[in-house]
Amino acid sequence: MSAAVAALAASAAFFLPGQAGAASGELLQPKENLECGFTRSYVAESKGWGPNAYYKNCSTDGKNVILEIRNALKFGRACAPPHQPHQATQLPLIDGVYEVMQAVVVGTGCTPASG
């Protein structure tokens, strides 16, 4: 694998979780596209994505959306850019510990964190 291809695969990890493994020679499984909106972690994992929850922003206006991410104990914020059919934003654990159980759009105009 050329260095350019490896660098491209590593840079795509934000939108295509698991693809960074291609640089290490890890065998990657094909992923099913996620539905628009919030996808719980166990559903995403069953479709070949990583073990976290995801949000797929299918808006056609080209704006990033601000998400309030929640579970029964805590809430936080995340940002999701518009996505192509094969893309989604992996949502972070709330406070680095709590699994995201729900994501609600509360605004637009945020800047996504770099991978």
Image (cartoon, rainbow, N blue to C red):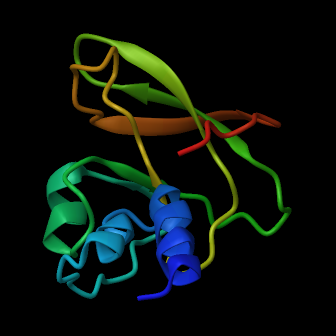
Q: Is residue 101 above or below residue 39?
A: above
Residue 107 position in % (x across, y down): 73, 33
Image quadrant assignment for residue 114: top right
Most foreground residue, 25 or 33: 25
The reply to whether residue 87 is visible in this rendering is no
Asked whether, in this view, residue 38 is left or right of residue 44, the answer is right
Asked whether, in this view, residue 48 is left or right of residue 20, the answer is left
Q: Is residue 83 above or below residue 72?
A: below
Q: Quadrant of the N terminus?
A: bottom left
Name the residue: 52% across, 77% down: 3
Image label count: 0
Most foreground residue, 9 or 87: 9
Name the residue: 53% across, 45% down: 115
Name the residue: 44% across, 38% down: 103
Residue 101 position in % (x across, y down): 27, 36
Residue 67 position in % (x across, y down): 57, 34
Name the residue: 44% across, 68% down: 16
Image quadrant assignment for residue 21: bottom left
Residue 22 position in % (x across, y down): 32, 77
Q: Is residue 104 above or below residue 4?
A: above
The reply to whether residue 39 is visible in this rendering is yes
